[in-house]
Amino acid sequence: EVAICFEKKKYLEAQRITENILKRCRRHASEAFLQNEKRLIDFYRKFVCLVQELEHIPKKRVQLGRLKQKI
């Protein structure tokens, strides 16, 4: 569409189409970021729960202490 507009010297139309494409790309990028952030938070919560459950196993306490410091 943009190329056709340039051929017909409709530069404002080409600019408008390009801006709309950029807006869509930004929106999709931010939606994807939010979804990934939510997945990361969910993973972190599950991971913390797992660490808390494993704390009850005596042999693993020392290693989990180091792991918690890294978290």
Image: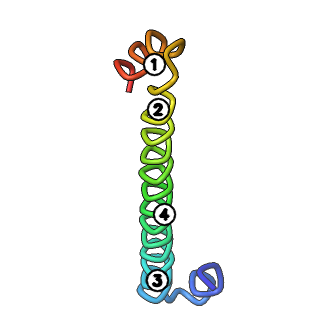
Q: Earlier in the sequence, mark 3 or mark 4?
A: 3
Q: Residue 6: image x %, image y %? A: 57, 81
Mark 1 or mark 3, whichever is nearer to me: 1
- Look at mark 2 in the image and give the residue it sits on: 51
Q: Residues within 10 Å of mark 4 (few under 14, many from 20)?
A: few
Residue 16 locus on image (x, y percent): 43, 84
Marker disc for residue 11 = 3
Colour setup of the view? rainbow
* Mark 1 vs 3, N-terminal side: 3
Find out whether the residues at labels 2 and 4 contact each other: C-beta distance under 8 Å. Answer: no
Q: Amino acid at mark 4?
A: Gln
Real-space Cα distance between discs 3 and 2? 59 Å
Could you tell me which secondary element the residue under label 1 belongs to? helix
Per the image, the residue denoted by label 1 is 64
Q: CA distance from mark 3 to mark 4?
A: 36 Å
Marks 1 & 2, CB-CB < 8 Å contact? yes
Distance from the alpha carbon under mark 2 to that under mark 4: 24 Å
Q: Quadrant of the C terminus?
A: top left
Horizontal and vertical percent position of residue 15: 44, 79
Label 1 sits on what residue type?
Answer: Leu
Looking at the image, which residue is at 63% across and 83% down?
A: 7
Side of 54 where 68 appears, left or right: left
Residue for badge 4? 35
Q: Quadrant of the N terminus?
A: bottom right
The foreground one among 46 and 25 is 46
Q: Which of pointers 3 and 4 indicates the residue nearer the eye?
A: 4
Identify residue type, mark 3: Tyr
Q: Earlier in the sequence, mark 2 or mark 4?
A: 4
**Closer to the camera in the image, 44 or 34:** 44
